[in-house]
Image (cartoon, rainbow, N blue to C red):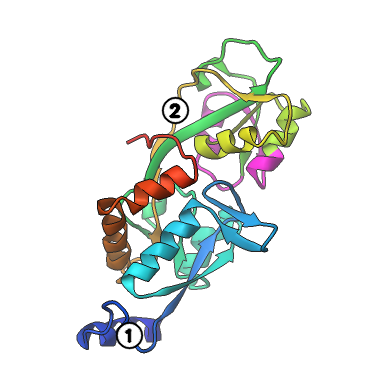
Amino acid sequence: MFNRRHLWGAAAALGLVSRGAIAQTPTLKVGSTPTGIPFTFLDTRTNTLTGFMVELITEIGKRQGFNTDVQAVPFAALVASLTSSRIDIISAAMLATPARREQIDFSDPVYGYGEGAAIRESESRPWRSLADMRGVTAGVQVGTIYIEPLRAAGLEVRTYDSVADIMRDVSLGRIQAGFGDAPIVSYQIAQNIFRGVKLIPDYRPSVLGSIAIGTRKGDPVLARINAGLASMKADRAFAALVGKWNLPASVD
């Protein structure tokens, strides 16, 4: 970390960070999850991580003078990996919550949403919010912010390593509902891998927030990330990326 900070400082002092001018472009390790489709996931054809957040940080790096080495990190280990300097940046479907802001810094908001709730297609009970679901056996991904709100609402919570695992157990009837980031849950269902699963119609999410790119506290790379994100939004490259990955409108 010491060497990288000095590299940024020296490059800035010499005016070398601008386009194509730096002789030794730094490479930053980016932590992303292999199970957060369409934001981050492992493309089994190429054995590489891809998705909206992977392409976003890669493009920001190109615009701001750094390369990215994207590495697969389990969601629950992302913050610890960042604070221990095993990675330099988190670019995943991670909501910028107050609790996480106590540990790391976040970029300007990237994309906003709440939780989505998946059930079996044969389920007909009139669930519209967590308040309607007391006593329901529900699955949620370990390390996400949905666990405590579900427990507080009186649901019986089981934790899973991935949304795909949750969808499997919903389809098999092992749990009555599965919760996760609404765009991720929606995408999983749209792939028709797990038959007989649907999103709860007209469900009103209880946990709303925005995902953002994470850095260590005080890391100067954050300013470059924000500048790159702003430039992508200004020239419509960000909107094009949202369209490419078929994301619904952001909830601001």
Q: Amino acid at mark 2?
A: Ser
Image height check: is 11 above or below 42?
below
Of helix, strand and loop, which one carries label 1? loop
- Is residue 191 on the magenta stretch? no
* Highlighted range, magenta: 142-165
- Residue 118 on image: x %, y %: 61, 27
* Quadrant where the image shows the C terminus: top left
Q: Is residue 46 left or right of residue 9?
A: right
Q: Amino acid at mark 1?
A: Ile
Question: What's the mark number on residue 186?
Answer: none
- Residue 167 on image: x %, y %: 68, 34
Q: Quick check: can you spot residue 144?
A: yes
Q: Residue at x 70, y 57 (%)?
A: 44
Residue highlighted by disc 2: 206
Image height check: is 125 above or below 211?
above
Question: What's the mark number on residue 22?
Answer: 1
Image height check: is 212 above or below 149?
below
For disc 1, the neighbor class at 10 Å (few under 14, some 14 to 19, many from 20) is: some
Q: Is residue 26 left or right of residue 54?
A: left
- Is residue 158 on the magenta stretch? yes
Q: Is residue 6 left or right of residue 48?
A: left
Q: Residue at x 68, y 41 (%)?
A: 164
- Residue 160 on image: x %, y %: 67, 43
